[in-house]
């Protein structure tokens, strides 16, 4: 029983997710019927499929934060993820882009979800440009770095690691946004560039603030033993929530292709978000990123692909299945590559130990023979 309640125990980490899932599914089944239950489960699976890379990225950031802020991420962060990012924020986006009052949009969401979905779809170019640019910045910030000793696809990452100046991610992202804006099929060119530019600036502002505060507090980013507290931890928490929003935008819009019931969307995506939080904590406490050395790489390649899909989805219809399958394929490949490397390292370590053991054995034999010669003499 004591092991089950340990902070690293899977039971303790996923316990709340299991209880929340059971309670929500029972509530949906009793209140709305078995069909609604089936839809909720589908939405939950969709959210998990789309957000596994989110959990991996979150784990890296969360590992830098103190235990207190990790708990805030699990408690306050869950509330923001469910009600803020998947209920309130879409309503706010529709209100701004459609020029409608808050109460009007809320009434549409509850009583006329088809019309609300239509307005949300109209806001898709703005959402995609902001989210796509923010995720591009995230991917480029990882790959345009010479601080990483481990590389997965060396033929690509070796060249990208030469672009080490802090401005390169913003420059390349801006060039790509400009390219998308100039495409003949893009009827939202101004929106693409402005919303994308705002996403780029948002990333720069938050990430820059985190680095500045860390330096001000005397915390080196490379020193993983020193955990973020205070303002630095708060900025990282804010960064995680915006990151979650960028990952969840398309999921919310895509959910309307499954159902127009806002309550079911909130329930299914919300439960999925809770599981993503639990997976993040599990990775942090079990050291998953250290055990699977290419997992972080796979997540950032997935982020890049997702960013391109988000920007393209404002121009062409892309089935909701595509980003999910792409993410599973890339992350699966990174896990497989990590396992292969781990096996090689384990075999090399085993051979090293055997060689040392053999050398020790030979030394013992040599010493015994020398001792016998001395005793005879």
Image (cartoon, rainbow, N blue to C red):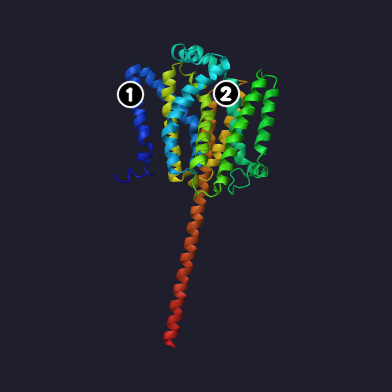
Q: Position of residue 303 (x, y in %)?
A: 56, 34
Residue projecting furthest to the left: 1
Q: Position of residue 102 (x, y in %)?
A: 50, 16
**Could you say which quadrant of the image residue 310 lies in?**
top right
* Comes first in the chain, label 1 or label 2: 1
Which residue in the structure is indicated by mark 2?
127
Q: Position of residue 27 (x, y in %)?
A: 33, 22
* Quadrant of the frame with the C terminus: bottom left
**Image point 45% across, 83% down: which residue?**
373
Q: Is residue 18 left or right of residue 129?
A: left
Q: Nearer the viewer, residue 179 or 219?
A: 219
Q: Is residue 353 above or below residue 159?
A: below
Residue 173 lies in quadrant: top right
Quarter that holds the N terminus: top left
Helix, strand or loop at label 1? It is helix
Relative to 209, is 86 above or below? Answer: above
Callouts 1 and 2 close, C-beta under 8 Å: no
Locate residue 152, reporting x and y percent.
58, 44
Name of the residue lying farthest toward the bottom:
377
From the viewer's perspective, is the residue at label 1 or at label 2 nearer? 2
Is residue 41 toward the left or the right of residue 142 in the image? Answer: left
């Amino acid at each position: 029983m004591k092991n089950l309640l340990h902070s690293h125990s899977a039971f303790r980490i996923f316990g709340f997710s299991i209880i929340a899932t059971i309670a929500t599914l029972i509530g949906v089944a009793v209140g709305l019927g078995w069909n609604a239950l089936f839809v909720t489960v589908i939405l939950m699976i969709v959210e998990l499929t789309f957000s596994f890379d989110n959990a991996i990225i979150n784990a890296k950031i969360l590992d830098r934060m103190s235990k207190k802020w990790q708990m805030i991420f699990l408690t306050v962060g869950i509330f923001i993820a469910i009600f803020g990012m998947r209920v309130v924020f879409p309503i706010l986006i529709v209100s701004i882009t459609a020029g409608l009052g808050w109460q009007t949009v809320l009434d549409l969401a509850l009583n006329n979800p088809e019309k609300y979905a239509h307005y949300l779809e109209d806001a898709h170019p703005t959402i995609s440009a902001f989210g796509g640019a923010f995720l591009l910045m995230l991917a480029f910030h990882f790959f345009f770095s010479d601080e990483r000793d481990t590389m997965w696809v060396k033929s690509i990452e070796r060249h990208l690691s030469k672009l080490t100046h802090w401005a390169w991610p913003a420059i390349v992202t801006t060039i790509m946004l400009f390219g998308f804006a100039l495409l003949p099929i893009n009827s939202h060119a101004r929106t693409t560039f402005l919303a994308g530019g705002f996403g780029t600036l948002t990333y720069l502002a938050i990430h820059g603030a985190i680095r500045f505060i860390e330096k001000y507090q005397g915390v080196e980013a490379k020193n993983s033993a020193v955990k973020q507290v205070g303002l630095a931890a708060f900025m990282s928490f804010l960064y995680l929530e915006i990151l979650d929003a960028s990952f969840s935008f398309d999921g919310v819009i895509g959910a309307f292709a499954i159902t127009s019931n806002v309550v079911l969307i909130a329930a299914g995506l919300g439960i999925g978000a809770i599981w993503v939080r639990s997976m993040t904590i599990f990775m942090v406490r079990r050291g998953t990123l250290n055990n699977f050395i290419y997992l972080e790489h796979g997540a950032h390649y997935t982020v890049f692909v997702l960013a391109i899909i988000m920007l393209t989805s404002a121009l062409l219809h892309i089935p909701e299945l595509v980003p999910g399958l792409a993410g599973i394929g890339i992350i699966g490949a990174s896990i497989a590559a990590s396992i292969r490397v781990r096996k090689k390292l384990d075999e090399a370590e085993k051979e090293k130990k055997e060689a040392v053991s053999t050398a020790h054995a030979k030394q013992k034999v040599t010493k015994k023979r020398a001792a016998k010669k001395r005793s005879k003499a």
